Every structure is written in C-alpha cells, then in structure tokens.
Image (cartoon, rainbow, N blue to C red):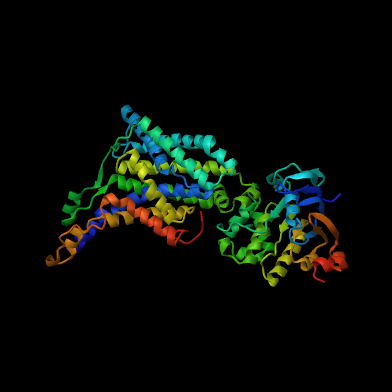
Amino acid sequence: MPFFSGEKMTGGYGGADIISSCTINANRGEIVTILGPNGAGKSTAMKAMLGLLNLKSGKVFIDGRDISKLTPQDRVKEGISFVPQTRNVFTGLNVQENLEMGAFLREEHIEEIITEIYELFPILKEKKNQIVGELSGGQRQQVALGRALMTKPSVLMLDEPTAGVSPIVMDELFEHILKVKKKNVAIIMVEQNAKQALSIADRGYVLVTGENKFSGTGRELLNDPEVRRSFLGG
Amino acid sequence: MDFINAIVLLLNYIFVPALSYGSQLALGAIFVSLIYGILRFAYFTAGDLMSFGTMFTILFTWYFQSLGINLGVLPTALIAIPFGMTITILYVLIKDKLIFSYYRTKKSPPVMLAMVSIGTMFVTQAIVRIVIGPFDRRFFDGEKFILKANEFKEATGLNEGLTIKSTQVITLFVTITVVSILFWFLNKTKTGKSMRAYSDNEDLALLSGIDPKKVVMITWVIAAILATVGGTLYGLDKSFKPFTYFNNMLPIFAAAIVGGIGNPFGAFLGGYVIAFSEILLTYAYRKFFVYILPETMEPDSLLQLLSTDYKFAVSFSILVVVLLFRPSGIFKGKIL
C-alpha cells in the first residue's frame, strides 16, 4: 500500500462534481505530478487530499491510517504540508518569522529546523530579516517551500510552484524540490509546465474532467504518443 | 526676547496639549486598527468602549476615595485603571461570544459586522448613561500642575508662561509604556507574531495551525486594555462626558485611516497627525504675530483659521483627503 493515497475520490465545491473516482498516491522519496488541461480538477484533487473539500465518496490514507474525516489543520499535524498556488507566504512578516509561523505547532527544536531550511535555501539566510513582500517571485516561492517544510512533513503538496516565474527560476525551484525529495518526503505537485515537471517526476497522473486518464512513470508519459499529442504539444 | 516668547506661546498652547491629546487618540486608533486588521471590520463602538472603560475606572476611583485610598500627588484613577480594565475585558469578551462570534462563524461580510458594531455602540452608550448618567464629570485628584505659568515666568523672566499639567505628563508616560509593550508583544512574542500572520494571510495562518479563537480573544483583550487606558487618560486630562467620547470616534477613525487601517504603528503616528492638525488649525495666532511682527504691522483680527467648534471638520477633511488620494494611509510599510 502506498504511503499517502487518495482512493476513488469524488466531490466538488457544492454543485457538480469536479473530480470523480480519482485516485492519486505517492510514496516517500517520490515526486508525483498531476497534469491535465485547464479545469481538469488537478488542484481540486490535491485540495481533496488536504481536506479543503468535502468528499462525497472515496478515502484518504496516510501510512495506513484513514484520515478522510480530519480537518485540514489536523492533517497538517499528521505530517501533510501544503503550499498554495497564490498567497502562500506572509508578505508582511520577514523571512525568519515566516519560517517560525510554519512551525507554530512545534514547541522545540525550531532553531535547528530553521538552520536546516537555511542550508537547503541559502538565499533565505541572507535575507532572513527582510520583509517577504519585498522579495522576488522565486525567493518568495522558496520562503513558501521553507515555511511548509518547517513542520518536518512526510508529505509535501505543491500547487503550481512554478506559476509565474521565469524559466531560469523554474529550473532552480525544481532543483530545490529534488533536494526536498532526498529528505525522504513524498511530494505531490500540480504543474502547468508538463514537460519539465515530468522530467523530474518519478510518476505522473493525467486527469481529464476529474478522472484518471493516464498514469505512469515520467518517462512513460513523456513517450506516450497520445499524451504527447494531447498535453505536451506534440 | 519676543521671539522666545512666541515660541513658548506655541509650546504652551499647541505643542504640549496636542502631544497629550494625540497620545489619547493614538491609543484609540491603535485598537481600531488592530480590530480592523484581525477581525476585518470597522469597530464603531470604539469611542463608547473608551467611555465604558473610563466609567468603571471612575466608579472604582470613587470607591477607593471613599475608603481613603489615594496615591498622594498622583490621581487615584491610576490604581482604579486595572479594575476598570478587567471589567471592560469581560464586557468585550461576553459581547464577542454573544454577538460577534455568531456573524464570524456565518462568515458575514465585513460591512455587516460594522453595522453590528453600531448596534453594540448604542447598547454600550445606553449602559453608560444608565449607570453613570450623561453629565460632565471630573475625577482628577492629586497635584494638578507640574509647572505653573507663574513659576515659569518668574524663573525665566519671560512674559509668556508655560504650563505643564501633571495629566499631560502622565498621559505621555503611560502611552509610551503601553505602546512599547504592545509593539514588543506584536513583534517579539510567538503569540504576537501569530496575530500579525493571521492579519496578513488568514488561510495560510490556519494551515500553519494558528488558532483563530485565541487570536480573536487576544485582540479583544488588547482592545479593552487600550480603550480603558486611553479613555481614562482623556478623562483625567479634560473631563468625562459620554457624548464627548462618542464624538471622539471621528478623530480616532481618522487617525487609524491616516496611518493605513490595519497598521497599528501607523495608527499610533496618525493620532498625533490628527491632534496636531486639529489644534494648529483652530488656534488663534494673533498673539504669536504680535510678538514676531514689528508694532506697525500688528494684526487686528484673531488670525484663527477655524473656530474650535469646527475641530471635527478638520479630522473629517483629513479623512476624506486621505481616502481620496492615499487610501492605504500616508505611511508606507508593512501591515500590522
């Protein structure tokens, strides 16, 4: 059984179902990417796994435990961390305070974890007293990643981490994500830049209208002619 | 010599009074700004909450006076403040539990909460009028002056006297203490930082495990403390009249908006901006110009830009101008 999984999830924000019978799973030390056209329910599937969405049916498991009924806050305590696509940092707080807020539920060892984060993202150490609102887009994303890692999560979910950053910054962010993977974290990310995402991902899911359409390893999907034609632009 | 007289005149009639009035407004503006930043609505009960806190401080002052307890040269009200504060804290927490929490859990729009706070404003006003009445009261005791005009004239040989009331010094001292503790709390403690984080990005704060109930509760406690302290200082300095406190809501809101609503430090400075503008624009400058101009050019009129009756027009104009041209406040910088 995979470490973290959403099984046959069906649901929406009231009204019609956005995802139906959608299954996504990830193991520790693995990067899984969710791809698909606009409105396919990629972010919704991820939010369902975090508990931001009430499921009509389907279950979410972590490490064999059923967490389908837990609130997002309680899932955070279970070791799931989430980086939203927008508004994913506290813009009015400085870098260090952002990281401290990430570890709000933690009583001790905060300093050690902050040091670890600074090793992972050296630029943050340089800018630790700067207000996050004044940082560049790529640096902000690093703050957002750092904040999410402060809980020492076993699962990290990223909603379009490279949206709106330049190609160079995108490569840099993917490198950081690979570093996080080495810390034995299960990473699930929704991506628009499908080719690049598949090149670093171990596995990928392609969703269409809320259902699993294709799935496989990054290479399989990259080489699948139908996937190429429909989602990767030939 | 005339020049020094002119300076002393301005110090005595503008600088010293504006500094203490500004501090009193600043305390009010800070909590209005804090409530706006965290609970996200305009708290119209501000002025009347200050009068509520002051009323209980006065009642305790009378009680202590009847027991013969006093602080000598300092006003008895200073010992009564913590007691008035406690009751005000209880009052806002009960009010939140009974009224505001209902609209918060329903996720009502901010304008609805603002309307609700107008409702609680009337209730608070009614309570104050039933308990202590609408009259003008003075509850200051102890030594009134630190520096009297005559003493200053004798000591310096100037024509103009400089008066410093003890309430002005107490106001300044208490304001600096309270505001320093508040900003230390917001910037250095974990709870304070979590309040800033909550105000900055509510969703992310929830994802980080910050407890919204605790943040809201602490906000109310701080509001009640600042309201009682600010209200009592104003009452000691001038007098306690519930209607005046209700009127003070306008300069308090103007100060909060000038400072960029949701930004307590801006609100703190905004208090002084409003106080100085009000007093500078309503002061009669005739005597000042008599000192600095040659005799032949002596002015005949009062040289007062606005009658003091119009002092609220000053805050109101500032409010409108700021909202039109700098809606995010005149101070650049971070929120909360």
Give whichever of B217, A228 is nearer the camera.
A228
Quadrant of the image containing the N terminus of chain B: bottom left
State left or right for residue B300 relative to residue A67.
left
Name the spot of residue B224 as percent of width and height, x first: 45, 40
Q: Is residue B315 visible?
A: yes
Give whichever of B160, A87 is nearer the camera.
A87
> Which quadrant holds residue A170?
bottom right
Residue located at (34% from left, 30% from top): B64
Name the spot of residue A27 as percent of width and height, x first: 82, 54
State left or right for residue B156 relative to residue B322.
left
> Which quadrant holds residue A32?
bottom right
Residue located at (30% from left, 51% from top): B311
Residue located at (50% from left, 36% from top): B95
Name the spot of residue B194 as percent of width and height, x first: 57, 49
Give whichever of B142, B250 is nearer the camera.
B250
Name the spot of residue A49 as percent of width and height, x first: 75, 50
State left or right for residue B157 relative to residue A29.
left
> Which quadrant holds residue A139?
bottom right
Give the farthest residue toward the front.
A15
**How many numbered marks, from 0 up?**
0
Give the farthest residue toward the left.
B296
Q: Is residue B213 visible?
A: no
Q: Is residue A123 above or below residue B50?
A: below
State left or right for residue B117 relative to residue B164.
right
Q: Is residue A177 above or below residue B151?
A: below
